[in-house]
Image: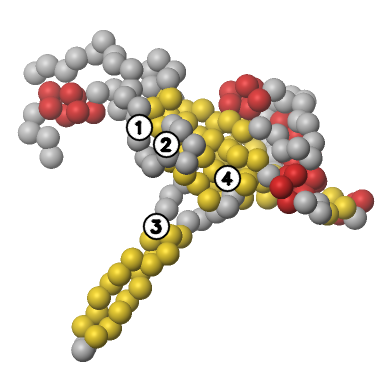
Amino acid sequence: MASTISQLGNTLKSGARSSKYRVSFAYPSSFNGETSLEDVDILAKTAIAPSKEIGVIEVYNQGRKLPIPGDTVFDNAWTVTFYLTEDHQLRYDMIKWLDSCDLFQKNIHTGNPLEVMSDLRLEQLDSAGEITAAYTLHNSWVSSVGEVSYGDEQQDEIGEFDVVFTYSDWVTGTEEYSTYKSKNATENATTFEV
């Protein structure tokens, strides 16, 4: 625990702000979305950085238990909540991405999974809009497009919907395949003194 407020302020600086982030991806080769990829980031209301853990192998010897590290495990689903525009274009694009994987009505299923996959990226930004940390999710594809809720009591609310992306693995860092190395955040003019 910090012994003084100034130590906490100098260590934390401005802190990682939950509202300073960017969501980005490219459409896969199987289709071209109509929503500008810059607009995708603006329409992203919420996203969560992926989590990771290592399984535990319990080895028993002479009545004692020794826990040793096992395999890496992570939930390979990533949910992003998007604001809904009046024309629903981003939602239509996500449905097109989903349909490029499997379109029941036309009995079409992708023969090449790589055509429906893309890398996704979640970036932490500082107050100057510079990337300070990043998460890249590999081989991602849309596995679910959520419902849109309507109701008379929602007259002062903008519609939103969830998209669940499934991915094979993820890495950290501002450069692809790097071990985690964060970039120093842009210094703010704020100083903490007590």
Mark 4 lies on a secondary structure that is strand
Disc nearer the start of the sequence (3/1): 3
In this orientation, does residue 88 appear?
no
| Image quadrant where residue 66 sits | bottom left
Mark 1 lies on a secondary structure that is loop
Quarter occupied by the C terminus:
top left
Residue with the mark numbered 1: 182
Tell me the kind of residue under disc 3.
Glu
Residue with the mark numbered 2: 173
Question: CA–CA distance between discs 4 and 1?
Answer: 20 Å
Mark 4 Cα within 10 Å, few/some/many (few <14, many 20+)? some
In this orientation, does residue 39 appear?
yes
Instruction: Please name the residue shown 39% across and 57% down the image.
Output: 53
| Image quadrant where residue 117 sits | top right
Residue with the mark numbered 3: 53
**Above or below: residue 185 compared with residue 24:** above
Residue with the mark numbered 4: 138
